[in-house]
Structure formats: structure tokens, C-alpha cells
Amino acid sequence: MGIGTALTKACIDCAKTAGYRQLELEVVAENKNAIALYKKFGFKESGSNPRGFYSRYTGWQELISMLLELD
């Protein structure tokens, strides 16, 4: 299990234990590996912001919002 998988699983487990009903995150649209990881855990894309993040190196970056409903 990679570090990203382990950390994502730990966050989900912690949220469930604390009684959360959903988790929401934002990820840079170009980060395809992270998006695939979150989808593997059941996150679904819920929106996007074309100018959601500014980097002085690359300019404006699109952010994808993702949502996971917890049981």
C-alpha cells in the first residue's frame, strides 16, 4: 500500500469514527494520479473551478471538487 492510499484510508476511517456523513476535497485537475486514487475510494467529481488555484510557476490551475458520502 502506497503512502497516498494509506493516508486517504486513514482520513476516511477517522471521519467515519467521528460521525461525519461526507468528505469533500479539491484537487488540481492535472493531478490525474490523485484523482484516480480518490475515485478508487468512491469519491465522485462534484464540480470544478477553472481558476481555483494560482501557481507563480504555471499560472491559474483548474481545481476539481470531489465528494464522498460516508455510510
Image (cartoon, rainbow, N blue to C red):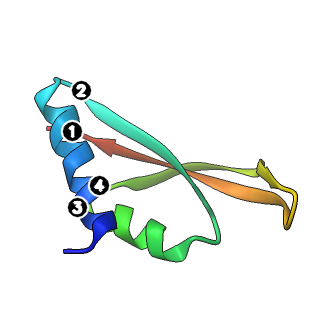
Residue drawn at point x = 16 percent, y = 23 percent: 19
Question: Element at badge 3?
Answer: helix
The amino acid on which the numbered mark 1 sits, given as a three-letter code, is Leu
Q: Are marks 3 and 4 in contact (CB under 8 Å)?
A: yes
Where 14 falls versus 35 (above or below)?
above
* N-term-proximal mark, 2 vs 4: 4
Residue 70: give its label: 1
Q: Residues within 10 Å of mark 3 (few under 14, many from 20)?
A: few
Residue drawn at point x = 19 percent, y = 74 percent: 1
Inter-mark Cα distance, 3 to 2: 19 Å
The amino acid on which the numbered mark 3 sits, given as a three-letter code, is Ala
The amino acid on which the numbered mark 4 sits, given as a three-letter code, is Thr
Q: Position of residue 43 (x, y in %)?
A: 35, 54
* N-term-proximal mark, 1 vs 3: 3
The amino acid on which the numbered mark 2 sits, given as a three-letter code, is Tyr
Viewer-side residue, 7 vs 63: 7
Q: Are marks 2 and 4 in contact (CB under 8 Å)?
A: no
Q: Are marks 1 and 3 in contact (CB under 8 Å)?
A: no
Inter-mark Cα distance, 1 to 3: 18 Å
Could you say which quadrant of the image residue 42 lies in?
bottom left
Q: Are marks 1 and 2 in contact (CB under 8 Å)?
A: yes
Choose mark 1 or mark 3, whichever is in front.
Answer: 3
Q: Position of residue 20 (x, y in %)?
A: 24, 26
Question: Element at badge 4?
Answer: helix
Inter-mark Cα distance, 2 to 4: 15 Å
Residue 8: give its label: 4
Q: Which residue is mark 3?
A: 6
